[in-house]
Image (cartoon, coloured by chain):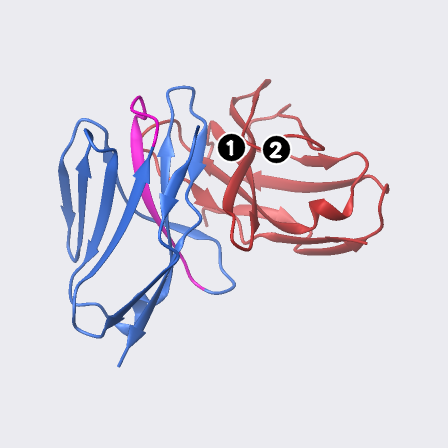
Amino acid sequence: EAQVTQNPRYLITVTGKKLTVTCSQNMNHEYMSWYRQDPGLGLRQIYYSMNVEVTDKGDVPEGYKVSRKEKRNFPLILESPSPNQTSLYFCASSLGGGSQPQHFGDGTRLSIL
Amino acid sequence: GEDVEQSLFLSVREGDSSVINCTYTDSSSTYLYWYKQEPGAGLQLLTYIFSNMDMKQDQRLTVLLNKKDKHLSLRIADTQTGDSAIYFCAERKRDDKIIFGKGTRLHILP
């Protein structure tokens, strides 16, 4: 089954403790992206990647890192999480640009205390 | 700026047409999208339109694009209770960055 898989689905952690949210897709998609969704703010793009070893900043990259060493994986890294990074995070992938639809994961709800 | 603006709420009676509006600021956007998000779920692409098109129809969905005014709309004909969701407008820029609006919550009245 074609899917985008995020892990974990839920995480409660403390300020400053490094964490990684994994994202994996099995559709051989080139484009992958991370978003955060906050009430009243909609979705905001954090980082995106057009292909392996190519990553670009989205709208709100501060406090986040990503890597794209393999086509299928696009982990989101919070080196020193802070409470303002408490949010619902979505990973998405698409075959390429333009008309190709993005497939979204089920979301990861992060709470940073 | 890079804003995509939408009204936050829309209430429509079941069976009527729903029209959700969106404005954007970047005239060089390549594609514009409409996504649907149901409670507790991720986003599902409903439809998209290339920036050199004016209109696209797909079953109950009609997308209208006024490039001069940078205005996009989504019309849902014969609105059903299953259409109750949050609808997001999004634009794809030339550098492939994607900007989403804040979403319009569609509420269906019986």
The colour of chain B is blue
Q: Residue at x 66, y 35 (%)?
A: A75
| Residue A80 image offset from top left, x and y in percent | 81, 37
Question: The N terminus of chain B lies in which quarter of the figure?
Answer: top left
Q: Which residues are magenta?
A: B25-38
Label annotation for residue A74: 2
Q: Chain of mark 1?
A: A
Q: Decide: marks 1, 2 in contact (CB < 8 A)?
A: yes
Does B24 sit left or right of B49 as displayed? Answer: right
| Residue B16 image offset from top left, x and y in percent | 16, 69
Tell me the kind of residue under disc 1: Met
Secondary element at tag 2: loop
How far apart are the two marked residues, 1 and 2, measured between alpha carbons? 7 Å
Q: Residue at x 54, y 31 (%)?
A: A59
Residues B49 and A26: in front is: B49
| Residue B18 image offset from top left, x and y in percent | 22, 61
Instruction: Tell me if mark 2 has few (under 14), some (14-19) or many (20+) residues whose alpha carbon lies within 10 angstroms of its own.
Output: many
Q: Is residue B9 magenta?
A: no
Does B7 sit left or right of A49 as displayed? Answer: left
